[in-house]
Image (cartoon, grey):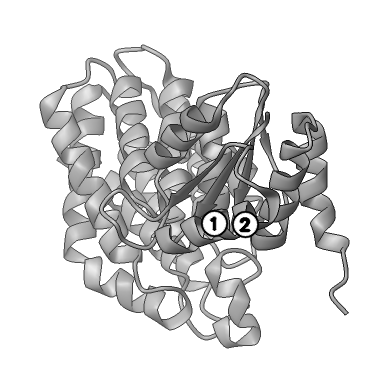
Amino acid sequence: MVGIVLISHSAPLAEEVAELACQIGGREAPIAAAGGTDDGGLGTSITKVADAVAAVDRGQGVVLLFDLGSAVLTAKTYLDEHPHAGVHLADAPFVEGAIAALVASAAGANAKAVTAAAEEARVVGKL
Amino acid sequence: MDVQFFVTWLEEVASVVQTQRDHLTQLDAAIGDADHGANLDRGFTAVRQALADTPPDTPGAALVLAGSTLIRRVGGASGPLYGTAFRQMGKTLGDAPEVSLAELSTALDAALAGVQKLGAAVEGDKTMVDALAPAVRALAGAVQDGAKPADAIAAAAEAAAEGARATIPLQARKGRASYLGSRSAGHEDPGAASTALILGALRTAGSR
């Protein structure tokens, strides 16, 4: 299955979004949180991103989701430093995108389809 | 300019960022999340340590080491941005032991291109690009005019400082301040201010 990595400024935010996604999408697809700086503050850590990618990589691709600011830049910089055809960036809303991605991955979608599922969450209306 | 010049520059940056840490944080408190001074201070302190632990042999190696350290250690958006800038400079210079003014100009242009590719900011968005782009132009112009290295670097530093001051009336279109809309006007952009400090340190290093 395709791995999902959630990159946020806040460690608890990333972990809780992962937990929420698992409650809806199940615990079969691998998902990991990469939130906060190395010393536990607000911000992002490229080391945490690298560790999270390694933790969820089952050889079928990994999709990165991010919240804002340095989370976006850290995801792009990670991919620049570690070019990997199987790692995809999803330009998606953080919460809804994570849920859609996890559901798609658990259903056996490939990395491209998981990325598309996350990105489609942007245009799904709530009202 | 040899490796010692670039190490001196990076150490000078670490020193000036430490001195200006609270000023940068105050600028960031006005329109951001009040961590720019602390983040850059942590990053360049780590750069100083890395340069001492594994002394680089070439200007390119010194800049790549600085960039990689900033990417790993800063935590905020300035880590990937400045990290990419220094790494691009370093990669452009390759393993040459000596760097000419023209090569420095080319490397600074590559730094700007890397920052713009990563952050997608253009001039006028109220970001570090508003200080870096005029400095790149000033340096290239000075090289074209056959200026002496010290004068060319001084021109670049002054252009960066002017560019940073010119961000005060702008409304932010990129970065954290863009969430504030028109309330971001009236404050100097912290990223442009730190870019001006970094290029000011280049002038200081050149006069040593």
> Which kind of residue does numbered mark 2 sit on?
Gln
- Type of amino acid at the residue the image marks with label 1: Glu
Q: Which residue is mark 1?
A: A19
Question: Is the residue marked by circle 1 packed among few (<14), some (14-19), or many (20+) residues within 10 Å?
Answer: some
| Picture coordinates of residue A96, whole percent (x, y) | 72, 60
Label 2: which secondary element:
helix
Front one among A42 and B20: A42
Q: Are marks 2 and 1 in contact (CB under 8 Å)?
A: yes
User: Looking at the image, which residue is at 30% across and 28% down?
Assistant: B65
Which of the chains bears the disc numbered 1?
A
Q: Quadrant of the C terminus of chain B?
A: top left
A80 with respect to B160 (left or right): right
Quarter that holds the N terminus of chain B: top left
10 Å neighbourhood of mark 2: few (<14), some, or many (≥20)? few
In the rendering, at what x and y percent does residue B197 appear?
A: 32, 57
Up-down relation of residue B93 to residue B114 (above or below): above
Q: Residue at x 63, y 38 (%)?
A: A28
Q: Which residue is mark 2?
A: A23
Residue at left 58%, top 40%?
A: A76
State which mark lies toward you, 2 or 1: 2
Q: Is residue B90 above or below residue B72?
A: above
Q: Position of residue B146 (x, y in %)?
A: 47, 32
Q: Is residue B5 above or below residue B2?
A: below
Residue at screen point 45% across, 22% down: B91
Q: Are marks 2 and 1 on the same chain?
A: yes
Looking at the picture, tell me which residue is in the foreground, A121 or B179: A121
